[in-house]
Amino acid sequence: MAMENLEQYEQAIAAFDKALEINPDYYQAWYFRGVALIKLRRFKEGYASAKNARKLILIFL
């Protein structure tokens, strides 16, 4: 998230991808990955990541 705050979105996405390799159920990584993708105007990928985050949040509630 620190990289995202510095607008280093590509590096942030890479870090979230690594986190998701370790734990694919890490909904925060899916969410912030989606935010970073949307900031880069990669809307389709961003919404898909956000959808994964939402699905996982609903499972864990």
Image: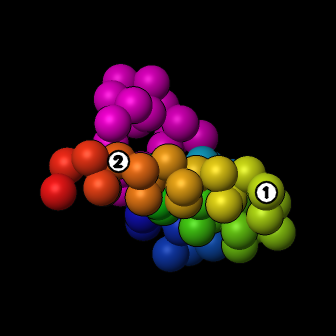
Segment colored magenta: 14-29
Mark 1 belongs to which amino acid? Lys
Q: Give the residue at x 68% y 59%.
A: 46
The residues tagged by marks 2 and 1 sit, at their Cα atoms, a distance apart of 19 Å
Could you say which quadrant of the image residue 37 lies in? bottom right
Q: Label 1 belongs to which residue?
A: 44
* Residue 21 is one of the magenta-drawn residues: yes
Q: Position of residue 24 (x, y in %)?
A: 39, 31
- Rendered image: mark on residue 56: 2
Q: Is residue 8 visible?
A: no
Position of 5 relative to 11 (above/below): below
Q: Give the residue at x 66% y 60%.
A: 47
Badge 1 marks a residue whose secondary structure is: helix
Question: In which quadrant will I find the C terminus?
Answer: bottom left
In the figure, is residue 22 to the left or right of 31?
left
In the figure, is residue 6 to the left or right of 19?
right
Q: Position of residue 10 (x, y in %)?
A: 69, 52
Callout 2: 10 Å neighbours few (<14), some, many (20+)? some
